[in-house]
Image: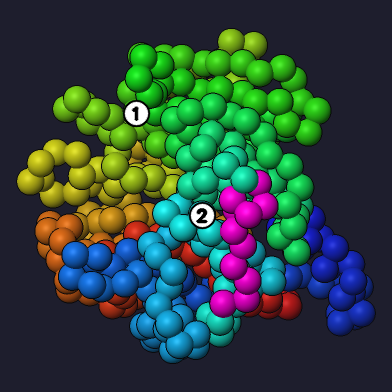
């Protein structure tokens, strides 16, 4: 939504570049960032691989080259501020938020979340943008709010224990997934935020171990929940429907998922590796038609993550390791597809790729 506003403003500001008084601006993916978790047991640190999509090349260890040292630790999440070419990562075990230049990969700023918020800032794990704020979910059970530009601390909202992911509704409430700790059951909780409605809780037998929210930008701010499962139950994707009575509906078994677009509208792309020893399946759920179809016939054999670009969600990336061994010391790959599942390129990345981000250039038409 922020992107749309900026695009419209940019069109108005640059109108003198076109005789008709209208300039069409498109933000095209020019970089794919892959955070590699490395292998601590083998003393292989975390790293970032930068894939130059336009020139078809991948650069390894650019962070180390530019900064003279390895990354602080293994990041648990990454977001990109794609209009200003910034990368943000969080290190739960170090209580740190780091801002990195998306073009040079030089470290711009390291922020101690406990230094700003005390114990509320322990274990920063998940991030998301909400209008002009960066929200950071912590293991301590709080959502920290930062200004998006200067990354200055603004507020902390208590969300409770076992929080695994967050999402903001059109009513400006924060919804948080809880995996369940001790005697508490897995649930969704709504937290008062920016003057929104009173707190609430949603439980369901479908929620066995919810770990990720997948945002879908439609009129209802619909969302999907990635459910990791436990006790031998397969992971699944669950649709979060809105109305007077909150409703949850299972879509498919899945290990990873992301939102995107196909030629019929908004889609959800899913990877299922839950069957031991079975070939992974890659499928696409069209939200408008409520249908599931095959996305890729022969995808990566050992996928580790899937993501769609933030602007138009037509570029789908899948990372993978070379074998089923999670302790492998060999480099992995990132495969880049269009929204119809056609392979656009495949590049070597670092050891145990785990997070994906995107950088853009502005094109005038």
User: Which of label 1 and label 2 is nearer to you?
Assistant: 2
The residue at the far top in this view is: 245
The quadrant holding residue 157 is top right
Classify mark 1: helix, strand or loop: loop
Considering only vertical position in the picture, is 159 above or below 75? Answer: above
Q: Which mark is residue 209?
A: 1
Q: Position of residue 336 (x, y in %)?
A: 37, 68
| Cα–Cα span, label 1 and label 2 | 24 Å
The quadrant holding residue 227 is top left
The image quadrant where one finds the C terminus is bottom right
The residue at the far left in this view is: 277
Q: Residues within 10 Å of mark 1 (few under 14, many from 20)?
A: many
N-terminal of the pair, mark 1 or mark 2, is 2
Residue under numbered circle 2: 95
The span shown in magenta is 107-117
Q: Nearer the viewer, residue 274 or 150?
A: 150
Considering only vertical position in the picture, is 266 above or below 196? Answer: below
Count the numbered circles shown.
2
Res 122 seen here = yes
* Image point (31%, 72%), residue name: 45
Q: Nearer the viewer, residue 244 or 149?
A: 149
| Residue 170 falls left or right of residue 246 | right
The quadrant holding residue 82 is bottom right
Q: Position of residue 239 (x, y in %)?
A: 46, 28
What's the coloring here?
A: rainbow
């Amino acid at each position: 939504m922020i992107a749309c506003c900026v695009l419209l403003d940019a069109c108005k500001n640059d109108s003198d570049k076109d005789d008709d008084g209208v300039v069409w601006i498109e933000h095209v993916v020019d970089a794919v960032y892959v955070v590699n978790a490395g292998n601590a047991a083998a003393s292989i640190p975390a790293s970032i691989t930068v894939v130059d999509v336009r020139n078809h090349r991948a650069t390894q260890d650019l962070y180390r080259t530019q900064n003279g040292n390895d990354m602080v630790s293994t990041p648990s999440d990454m977001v990109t501020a794609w209009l200003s070419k910034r990368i943000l990562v969080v290190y739960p075990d170090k209580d740190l938020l780091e801002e990195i230049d998306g073009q040079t990969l030089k470290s711009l700023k390291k922020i101690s979340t406990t230094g700003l918020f005390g114990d509320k800032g322990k274990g920063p794990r998940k991030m998301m943008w909400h209008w002009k704020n960066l929200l950071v979910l912590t293991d301590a059970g709080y959502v920290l709010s930062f200004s998006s530009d200067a990354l200055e601390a603004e507020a902390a909202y208590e969300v409770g224990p076992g929080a695994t992911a967050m999402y903001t509704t059109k009513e400006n409430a924060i919804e948080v997934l809880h995996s369940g700790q001790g005697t508490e059951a897995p649930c969704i909780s709504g937290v008062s935020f920016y003057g929104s409605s009173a707190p609430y809780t949603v439980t369901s037998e479908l929620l066995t171990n919810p770990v990720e929210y997948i945002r879908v930008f439609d009129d209802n701010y619909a969302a999907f929940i990635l459910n990791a499962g436990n006790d031998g139950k397969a992971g699944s994707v669950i649709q979060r429907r809105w109305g007077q009575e909150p409703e949850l509906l299972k879509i498919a078994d899945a290990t990873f998922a992301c939102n995107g677009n196909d030629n019929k509208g908004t889609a959800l792309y899913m990877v299922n590796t839950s069957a031991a020893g079975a070939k992974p399946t890659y499928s696409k759920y069209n939200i408008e038609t409520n249908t599931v179809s095959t996305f890729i016939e022969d995808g990566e054999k050992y996928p580790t993550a899937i993501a769609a670009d933030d602007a138009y969600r037509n570029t789908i990336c899948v990372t993978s390791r070379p074998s089923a061994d999670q302790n492998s010391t060999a480099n992995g790959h990132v495969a880049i597809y269009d929204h119809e599942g056609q392979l656009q390129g495949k590049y070597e990345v670092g050891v145990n790729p785990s997070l994906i981000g995107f950088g853009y250039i502005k094109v005038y038409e």
